[in-house]
Amino acid sequence: MYFTMAQKANKLLLKYNIINFPINIDIIEYIIENEGLEIEFTDSIKNAVIIDNTIYMNKPDNTHDYRSFVIHEYGHYTYQCGNIEYLPNKNKYEMEAQAFAAYFLMPIGIFEKHLELEENDYELSQDFGVTLELVKFRKSLTKALIDSGEYNLLAYSLYFNEDLKNIPSSIGWSRLTDA
């Protein structure tokens, strides 16, 4: 299910030639605006809402939260036609948007290379400029791809035209589950 979100995230990374991480906030805002969406900050709502081509949301306290939240909402807008509040299977759509954000901010291959360096979750959070929660979610996505046998296929087809021999074929399980 999240395989498609990885493909969509990498397509956007390639379109904008993003190769440096963490992705600068200005670049994220440029992409969102260039894709026809605006961001408006308001204190009058609890959860983000998308109306027409505008994301209305509270401004997060830090850049890690902002980076994660705004890309998550962009995922809703682009791949689920905006608001999901009244749709059946709301949790499914939330997880898809979260997978899109995780794959966009921590791309296939690059994230796993960091895992090979035995970085802990805090270090990964700093390297990619995301929340610890998103790092843990991304690790679970990697584990699921490896368990399903789809990791190498996805890495080969998406990882910036990298040759398969340079992509890790397996990751130590402890790297996927430590705190």
Image: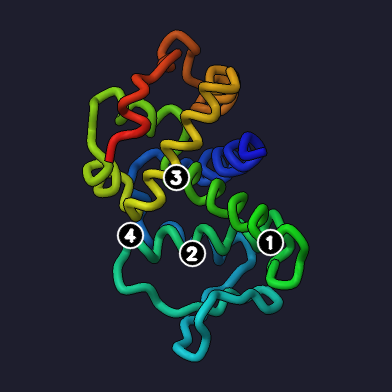
Please name the residue that numbered disc 1 is placed on.
90
Q: How is the image coloured?
A: rainbow
Residue 7 found in image quarter:
top right
The residue under label 3 is which amino acid type?
Phe
For residue 137, the mark is 3
Q: Earlier in the sequence, mark 1 or mark 4?
A: 4
Q: Which x, y percent locates residue 78?
A: 67, 58
Q: Quadrant of the C terminus?
A: top left
SS class, disc 4: helix
Q: Which three-letter amino acid code belongs to the residue tagged 4?
A: His
Q: Tell me which numbered mark, 2 or 3, is placed earlier along the sequence.
A: 2
Mark number, residue 169: none
In percent of width and height, residue 133 lies at 38, 52
Residue under label 2, please give it: 70
Q: Position of residue 87 (x, y in %)?
A: 76, 66
- Residues at marks 1 and 2, CA–CA distance in whole angstroms: 18 Å
Q: Earlier in the sequence, mark 3 or mark 1?
A: 1
Mark 4 touches mark 3? (CB < 8 Å): no
Distance from Cα at disc 3 to Cα at disc 1: 18 Å
Q: Marks 4 and 2, how far apart in space?
A: 10 Å
